[in-house]
Image: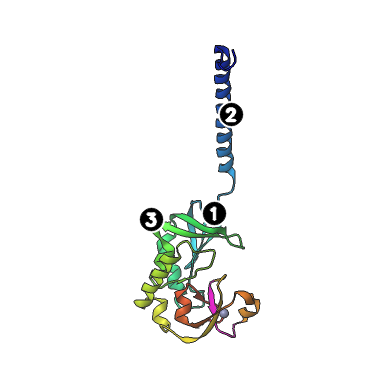
Amino acid sequence: MPGSWTHKQKLLSLVGGGVALSLIAVFVLTRAVRSAAEPAPADERKWVTVERVYRGDAAEVDPDDELVYAGIRAPYKDEPLADRSRQRNAELVAGRRIRLRFDKQERDKKGRLVGYAFVEGKLVNEILVREGLAYARITPDTRRYAELLLKAQSEARRARRGIWKLRPSNEEREYWADPKYGHFHLPACAERAKAKPERIVTLASSRAALDRGLAPCGQCRP
Ligand SMILES: [Zn+2]
């Protein structure tokens, strides 16, 4: 009869539907298994164990990797407070299992992990900045906790902790920066030759540079 299904047709249709559902289930499961084997997307969380802290913002971690903290820069080894910054970082993370979160890029050009480190729910990157043992260093690739890090830095600057006890609170002079790298420089810095002219911004004071999350260059030391 046209327009109405026989019992057999209904049965066939149900079986067909069942087969289709099973196929969808197999497809979804296969995809889930496959995605577990694919490289983690940038936002995925990862657990690592810190084996050796060698800087205020970097460490060797297990399994066999190197980690640098995103959004901050600790004093370099010949800058004041480099040791204190490294020791504090070690106190916070050495030998511990820490959780990492990532920004746009999970790794830098050298292949190191670039992440935000959490210990007992606290963001280590932020603790170091708040204690004046690292500068906020915000780039277009590390904006995830920019607000938090800049707030922590303002607090450290106001209280003149660590680095901020040694720096003048503000210097009114001309600096320049290539925001892609998150550093500000003196006019004569050699880095200028490598910077893309169309990206360069000029700043009228160190406060203006620090307020937008630029950290002083390690070479010209503005
Ligand atoms: Zn410089």
Considering only order in the chain, which callout, 1 or 2, is on the residue closer to the N terminus?
Answer: 2
What's under tag 1, amino acid-wise?
A: Ala
For label 2, being within 8 Å of ligand 1 is answered no
**Quick one: label 2, few (<14), some, or many (20+) residues within 10 Å?**
few
Considering only order in the chain, which callout, 3 or 2, is on the residue closer to the N terminus?
Answer: 2
Residue named by callout 1:
42
Of all residues, the one furthest to the right in this rendering is 193
Quadrant field for ligand 1: bottom right
Considering only order in the chain, which callout, 1 or 3, is on the residue closer to the N terminus?
Answer: 1
The residue closer to the viewer here, 147 or 90, is: 147
Where residue 176 appears, as percent x and y from the top left, is 55, 80
**Quick one: label 1, few (<14), some, or many (20+) residues within 10 Å?**
some
Any part of residue 117 in sight:
yes
- Residue at 49 percent across and 61 percent down: it is 52
Residue named by callout 2:
23
Q: Nearer the viewer, mark 2 or mark 1?
A: 2
Q: Is residue 174 magenta?
A: no
For label 3, being within 8 Å of ligand 1 is answered no
Residue named by callout 3:
121
Residue 121 falls in image quadrant: bottom left
Q: Is residue 28 above or below residue 123?
A: above
| Magenta stretch: dominant secondary structure | loop
Q: Nearer the viewer, mark 3 or mark 1?
A: 1
Where residue 11 appears, as percent x and y from the top left, is 55, 16
Q: Secondary structure at mark 2?
A: helix
Residue 154 falls in image quadrant: bottom left
Q: Is residue 87 above or below residue 184?
A: above
Q: Is residue 40 above or below residue 104?
A: above
The residue closer to the viewer here, 205 or 14, is: 14
Q: How is the image coloured?
A: rainbow
